[in-house]
Amino acid sequence: MKQIKKMITMLCTSLLLISQVHAVELLDKVAVVVNQGVILENEIQTMIAELKLQAERSEQELPSDKALRVQVTERLITNELQQQFASQIGLEISDAQVQQTVQDMALKQNTTIENLRQQIILNGGDYESYLEQVRQELTASEVRRAMVSRRIYVSPQEIEGLVSLLKERGQQNEEYHLGHILIGLPSGATADEIESSQNRAEKVIQLLGEGSDFRKVAIGSSSGAKALDGGDLGWMNVNEMPSLFAEAVTNQKKDSVIGPIRSGAGFHILKIFDIRGRQTVEVKEVNARHILISPSIIVSNEKAKNMLTQFLEDIKSGDADFAELAKEYSEDPGSAIKGGELGWSDPSRYVPEFKNTLAELEPGEYSQPFKTTHGWHLVQLLERRTQDATDSAYQERAYRLLFNRKFNEEAEAWIREIRDQAYVEILGDNS
């Protein structure tokens, strides 16, 4: 009897191990073929689990598992195509770039990288997987920037036209926080397909009018690029938006639901989550002069510092003139010929050590010698002023708005192009 019990125990253990191995194989099976690459079932399930966890924490409802899987699969296909494209053009994100991005994210959350790592682990995540996700997001962003930017041209006439318009409307800083749902249309849609999409769009409008949560509806119904983000397009000025959107939201109020708006891509529905107003553009500038000594094989760090220390003593005692010393010894050719003067500038354009040193000086005061990536500096702050930068801000803002508008439109078009040109096969039942 003992022998029989032992055999039964061993058999049950074997069956359990086989079932676990089978489960792992199912998760690791290929779910989608994308050109020469693949997307594993595990990747789809992991993203779905992450979205459900996020929704649970924020008390956000999600659509059906079927709708969620479709959206996640499309997101992963788009990501895989962008990663492949980056590989083709030799674009790589370094470990340093990833670490810097994580550092910035930690600072925004008022925490440290180590605390962020511990939080990810406590939430059941894997920190190495998190870093790889950051790398992939950076890669996708950079490949879009590289491929789309070259397709964009903003003419001086466009900038001047928009500057005039901004000044007339006084809306240079008025921005809308938009939500977006796209009920898409296939290429060469038939009349029946157009009617069906329009009916779906009207149904979405009805659901929103009855109080349905916009973000949940977007996740379940939208075919737009931001569907999995609840259709959240973020903050945009009217001049950054596609023209159809800009015309629709102008003079609308917070919480307005707008649409459906027809375009070649389908029927668009917008919600204005929030609106924020304009602000005065002022720039605090400094006028300073410096002497730069760069360490070399001949001039050590200690010698460079000692030279500037002696210069400072001679200047203060009246035995030397700052401008003459700069002309003779400074290794910054642009300022040396002008006696070390850098001219009026926004201090944020300088390297951190230089900017911080200037912040501590009063007009007319000299710094002690200090080091930056360029070498050793001796600085005198000459003056401070607050400058009305409205005109230049109009120019810079107009260019950025026009570029961003064109970039967003071209990015969507580029992603559709690489999707249409790709070989994509969804294996099995993607439901």
Image (tube, helix red, strand yellow):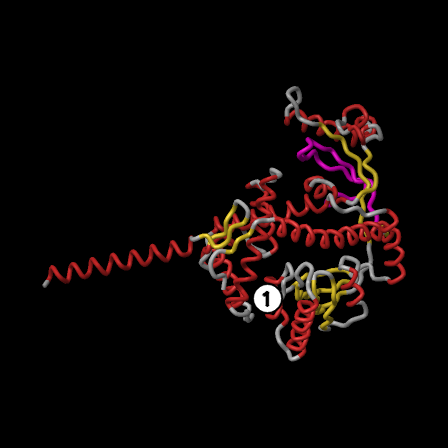
Q: Quadrant of the N terminus?
A: bottom left
Q: Relative to the observer, which residue lies in front, 253 or 383?
A: 253
Q: Which residue extends farthest left?
A: 1
Question: In this view of the protein, can residue 138 be seen by the observer?
Answer: no
- Image spot of residue 177 (x, y percent): 71, 64
> Who's the residue at 75% across and 36% down the image?
379
> Who's the residue at 67% across and 35% down the image?
372
> Who's the residue at 76% across and 55% down the image?
405
SS at mark 1?
Answer: helix
Chain part drawn in magenta: 359-386
- Image spot of residue 315 (x, y percent): 79, 30
Q: Relative to the observer, which residue lies in front, 182 or 61?
A: 182
- Image spot of residue 15 (x, y percent): 26, 59
- Image spot of residue 266 (x, y percent): 70, 64
Label 1 amino acid?
A: Ile
248 displayed left or right of 125: right
235 displayed left or right of 113: right
Up/down of 135 relative to 6, above or below: above
Question: In this view of the protein, can residue 2 be seen by the observer?
Answer: yes
**Residue tagged by mark 1?**
219
- Are there few (<14), some (14-19), or many (20+) residues within 10 Å of tag 1? many
Up/down of 251 relative to 209, above or below: above
